[in-house]
Image (cartoon, rainbow, N blue to C red):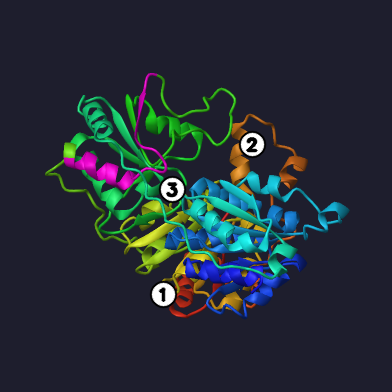
Amino acid sequence: MNGAQALLRSLVDAGVDVCFANPGTSEMHFVAALDDVPQMRAVLTLFEGVASGAADGWARMTGRPAATLLHLGPGLANGIANLHNARRARTPVLNVVGDHATTHKRYDAPLESDVDALAGSVSTWVRRCLTTADLAADAMDALAAAYGPPGGVATLVLPADVSWGQGGRTAPPRRRRRPSLVHPDTVAEVGSALGLGERAVLFVGGDALTERGLLAASRVAAATGVRLLCETFPARLPRGAGLPSVRPLPYPPEPALEALAGTRHLVLAGAREPVAFFAYPGLPGTFVPEGCAVHALAEPGQDATAALEALAELVAPDTAPVVSAPARPALPQGPLTPQALADVLGALLPQDAIVVDEALTSGRSLAQATAGCPRHDWLTLTGGAIGQGLPTAVGAAVACPDRPVIAVQADGSAMYTITALWTCARERLDVTAVICDNRAYAILDAELARVGASGDGARARQLLELHPPDLDFVALAHGQGVPASRARTAEELAEQLARALAEPGPHLIDAVLAG
């Protein structure tokens, strides 16, 4: 048995049975071993950023790592943006990065690079395997590191000769660590702070954003008057009728500062202190108001859901959570504005849908329009590196083949990883991509003004507008085997979305937004 065969058999036995791959020469023995280990599902992507984003989406929906298979340092570099998003989401991902054979490293071949350094920028764990006999055991260490807690990206660098070498040995999975429990004294201290009657915010994120965690947080809010907010871009947020509606902290600094203004106690449950994505002239970098006491109920890696339930039993033992009532917006008519797009989605969103939201500026009305829809999950751009939406939808659809996936996707960031559509077609994934087509990097328009830069000139506009030429998303989809249509009115979008949701397989709708 060679190293690659031992690696694949050990991964499958440990529950890693999906690999999103874009392989090269150094990974050919891994590829060949797939015929010996048919339990491993290999999903080909045409770009490494699709593979890494898909692994993120898979793990967000299953709680288990998928593997990626990447080619040397350049291949890893192509996947780093979405590995960054996975790192910020604390998603368990297992990277297998092929490298030159150990005997070939000294020649400084054209594709030679510092793979370990590249991996270290996005990984919580990196190891270069040195012997065939240790390969499977190293992979099990990587898997344990990916699971955490907290979860993270683990990267195993696999030299080609370690993969093809004979003497491979399978290895059993490591015992998984459980999140540590929050000490009762911490819960009591937070309960005392909330009992002071001062303005307080319960800021929830990470592993606390489960159905149990949200129900407990809502009980606390109902009993104490604390305001309930969640991270701006949660990795996975269960939503819909019968669940509490939790407002994400706004992305722009001005409304975020306003949302927390006057807060005397900020309680963190699975989330870190909220800070601005960027520095802005005249604005603070942190959103925590001056004089506000910050209380860490549960750090990332601790059992935040259990901590919230303990806090609810302490301060709200007889209080019921406040949940969203079933409600849908009426189907709109007329011009296809961002509000109309949100209302169409809210009117038609199916039960158990998975919504991958990279709509950016066009999606500001989505949360309100869908709060009372049937239960669904919402996945967002946690790390802020655009180009995540379509790949994450691929991973979510592979993970949950019985659930419809809707990717609400900005046009500019769609182009970063547009080849995800090809994987959707090849795997017959039930993904409906709704492209928010405003023909601009609209978010940069707002950022230009916010940072105080002057950008009224024609040359500046050339870097913000996506025309001419216009991007033809229908042609781009058709060229990759995905049925596609174009909607210019609310009525057209409603008709096309209903049809796409009723038909199996992938679809794309180019939603051309009114100016």
Front-most of residues 11 and 61: 11
In the picture, residue 136 is in which quadrant? bottom right
Task: Identify which residue is drawn at 24% across, 35% down.
Answer: 184
> Element type at marker 2?
helix
Vertically, is 505 above or below 261? below
Q: Is residue 435 visible?
A: no
Task: Look at discs 2 and 3 and give the one toward the viewer.
Answer: 3
Label whose residue precedes the other's in the sequence (1 or 3) = 3
Vertically, is 265 above or below 132? above
Residue tagged 3:
149
Label whose residue precedes the other's in the sequence (1 or 2) = 1
Label whose residue precedes the other's in the sequence (2 or 3) = 3
* Left or right: residue 212 compared with residue 364: left
In the picture, residue 340 is in which quadrant? bottom left
Does 312 lie within the magenta span? yes
Does 488 lie within the magenta span? no
Residue tagged 2:
448
Give the CA separation, mark 1 to mark 3: 28 Å
Q: x%, y% of residue 479?
A: 69, 75
Name the kind of residue labelled 1 in the image: Asp
> Element type at marker 3?
loop
Name the kind of residue labelled 3 in the image: Pro
For the N terminus, give its image quadrant: bottom right
Name the kind of residue labelled 2 in the image: Leu
Task: Look at discs 1 and 2 and give the one toward the viewer.
Answer: 1
Residue tagged 1:
402
Q: Is residue 114 visible?
A: yes
> Element type at marker 1?
loop
Q: Over which residues does the magenta segment extend?
A: 291-313
Determine contact: label 1, label 3, CB under 8 Å.
no
Give the CA separation, mark 1 to mark 2: 43 Å
